[in-house]
Image (spheres, coloured by chain):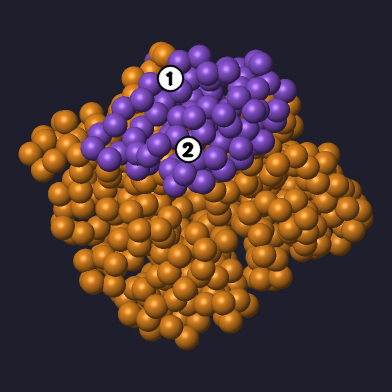
């Protein structure tokens, strides 16, 4: 036999005990050929294209997961930003396309469909503006559809006009889904430097540089990393900790790449990228915050958390980059509050403040993710939080995002349950001083000097 | 790129007939055992086998169901995974 027993048993243990899994296989589908002046016709084309392209996705992913022994948690589809598809529609209403996408997702049996999106980092087209205005309705009347707006980039700066509109859209979306704790907002993210091949929700869309179809995978595996560090013990130096994370990230990524390539081959579509992100789930032990604690900080958000997270994110990238021929997406470590039981516990205990979370996002792979805020948080405060988060991404040439949930009627300390992978969150207190006068100026914060790289 | 070999693992409390039952389940499905190792650590029994799927026309899911069924009847856990996953995770 070509394997040692301990190698085989390690793989089995990583899957059965440490919850190693592939978080998602996401099929990217171009909808550029679906544009039509008649909105109903465009929606029909969108529905048919998605149904045709992803018909075998669920069955294929299930079969590959079974044969290789690595669970695939979610099956998803990402599509061309809908603002481009709807741009040709005479009446300009993108909501029928939202409904068509949601219907296709339900009938295919996939978990999410992403791409109700617009890229407005330098300015909004008429269609982009209509899509942003439609967000509260589109994401409230659908179930599996996710949306994203890219409002900033290191090349273009920050579109403050869009950021101001998005604060209002998020507040309205929360109110439109008030009976579910504002859960509509869990399906929407504002980005700086959005990536075109991200397989993770809520921000997945099929970018303009992508082929007709592409199959991406997002790996997971924080439980396996934590278990490996626990074995290493408290006396191992941080250099040794980083090396161990690299080793596990390598193995996890190899599994993700193999599964992705196999699913892609069976579907007859090109393999896109393997996204190296450590993605937590609410399950006990499947937690990025628990890794930080294993490294030696008292809780997520404690002093030292940013340094520990920087080590973790970097080591994941180094281990993963060697393991995959095609790394992409967000790649790093996710720190969603509600989706990580230990993150939420740290927030509830007062260790994790919104401000500390923002600092941590400077070294993680995304941003202020799944943060529950008081229901009376004003649109301008939401916009100001978003502007800060985008500024971190723009200046550091990285992707950052804000997925904020102002929970209607909730006060700091209240607990809201979003269900499933979205988890539960303790509503975080928020500094009420904002930047309404800055936002009212409008315009665009220019790109930083180091954007001039040519 | 689907391979023709798989790794079978069996873990559980040692008792009479585990190897016989697992081997019989694989044989019934037309699966050939190419290499097999066993060890007991106290009461814990572990078995790892490399098997060939070229000799069978049975779908993977069917083989898997037969194997796990036979193991469950003895109160032990069995897994069968395509060998590529171990190549991917443990070989550069």
Q: CA distance from mark 2 to mark 1?
A: 14 Å
Report if residue A301 is visible in the image: yes
When asked about the image quadrant of residue A111, the answer is: bottom right
Is residue A419 placed above or below A84 in the rendered structure? Answer: below
Could you tell me which residue is drawn at 43 percent across and 69 percent down?
A424
**Circle 2: element type:** strand
Report if residue A398 is visible in the image: no
Left or right: A27 as drawn, with respect to A407: right
How crowded pointer 1 is (Cα within 10 Å; few <14, some 14-19, many 20+) is rated as some
Q: Which chain is orange?
A: A
- Identify the image quadrant of the N terminus of chain A: top left
Q: Which chain is purple?
A: B
Q: Position of residue A194 (x, y in %)?
A: 52, 44
Dot 2 or dot 1: first in sequence order is 1
Q: Do tags 2 and 1 sit on the same chain?
A: yes
Name the mark on residue B78: 2
Name the mark on residue A428: none
Which residue, given by chain and number where applicable, does mark 1 sit on? B36
Query: In this view of the protein, which residue sits in the foreground, A10 or A335?
Result: A10
Q: Position of residue A84 (x, y in %)?
A: 74, 47
Q: Which residue is situated farthest in the left direction here?
A: A235
Query: In this view of the protein, which residue sits in the foreground, A157 or A379?
Result: A379
Left or right: B90 as drawn, with respect to A347: right
Query: In this view of the protein, which residue sits in the foreground, B11 or B60?
Result: B11
Is residue A296 placed above or below A141 in the rendered structure? Answer: above
């Amino acid at each position: 036999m070509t394997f040692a027993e301990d190698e085989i048993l390690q793989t089995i243990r990583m899957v059965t005990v440490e919850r190693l899994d592939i978080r998602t296989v996401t099929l990217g589908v171009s909808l550029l050929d679906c544009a039509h002046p008649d909105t109903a016709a465009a929606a029909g084309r969108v529905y048919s294209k998605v149904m045709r392209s992803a018909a075998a996705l669920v069955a294929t992913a299930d079969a590959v997961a079974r044969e290789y022994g690595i669970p695939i948690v979610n099956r998803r589809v990402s599509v061309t930003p809908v603002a481009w598809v709807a741009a040709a529609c005479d009446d300009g209403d993108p909501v029928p396309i939202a409904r068509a996408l949601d219907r296709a997702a339900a009938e295919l049996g996939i978990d999410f469909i992403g791409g109700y999106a617009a890229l407005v980092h330098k300015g909004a087209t008429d269609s982009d503006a209509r899509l942003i205005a439609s967000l509260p309705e589109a994401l409230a009347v659908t179930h599996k559809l996710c949306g994203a707006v890219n409002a900033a980039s290191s090349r273009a700066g920050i579109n403050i006009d869009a950021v101001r509109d998005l604060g209002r859209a998020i507040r309205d979306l929360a109110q439109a889904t008030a009976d579910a704790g504002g859960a509509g907002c869990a399906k929407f993210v504002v980005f700086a430097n959005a990536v075109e091949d991200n397989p993770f929700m809520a921000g997945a869309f099929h970018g303009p540089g992508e082929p007709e179809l592409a199959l991406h995978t997002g790996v997971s595996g924080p439980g396996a990393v934590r278990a490996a560090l626990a074995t290493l013990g408290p006396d191992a130096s941080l250099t040794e900790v980083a090396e161990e994370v690299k080793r596990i990230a390598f193995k996890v990524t190899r599994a993700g790449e193999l599964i992705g390539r196999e699913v892609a081959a069976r579907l007859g579509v090109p393999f896109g990228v393997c996204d190296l992100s450590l993605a937590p789930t609410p399950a006990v032990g499947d937690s990025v915050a628990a890794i930080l604690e294993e490294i030696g900080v008292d809780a997520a958000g404690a002093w030292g958390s940013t340094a520990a997270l920087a080590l973790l994110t970097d080591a994941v990238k180094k281990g993963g980059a060697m393991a995959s021929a095609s790394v992409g997406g967000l790649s790093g470590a996710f720190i969603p509050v509600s989706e990580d039981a230990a993150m939420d516990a740290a927030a509830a205990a007062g260790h994790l403040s919104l401000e500390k979370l923002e600092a941590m996002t400077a070294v993680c792979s995304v941003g202020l993710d799944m943060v529950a805020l008081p229901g009376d948080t004003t649109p301008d405060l939401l916009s100001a939080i978003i502007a800060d988060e985008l500024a971190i991404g723009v200046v550091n040439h990285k992707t950052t995002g804000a997925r904020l949930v102002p929970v209607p009627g909730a006060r700091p300390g209240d607990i809201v349950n979003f269900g499933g992978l979205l988890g539960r969150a303790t509503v975080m207190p928020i500094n009420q001083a904002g930047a309404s006068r800055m936002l009212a100026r409008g315009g665009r914060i220019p790109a930083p000097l180091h954007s001039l790289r040519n | 790129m689907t391979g023709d070999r798989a790794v079978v693992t069996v873990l559980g409390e040692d008792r009479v007939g585990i190897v016989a039952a697992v081997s019989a389940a694989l044989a019934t499905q037309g699966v050939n055992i190419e290499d097999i190792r066993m060890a007991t650590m106290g009461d814990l029994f572990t078995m790892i086998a490399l098997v060939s799927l070229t000799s069978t026309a049975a779908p993977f899911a069917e083989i898997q169901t037969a194997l796990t069924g036979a193991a469950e009847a003895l109160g032990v856990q069995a897994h069968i995974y395509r060998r590529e996953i171990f190549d991917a995770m443990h070989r550069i």
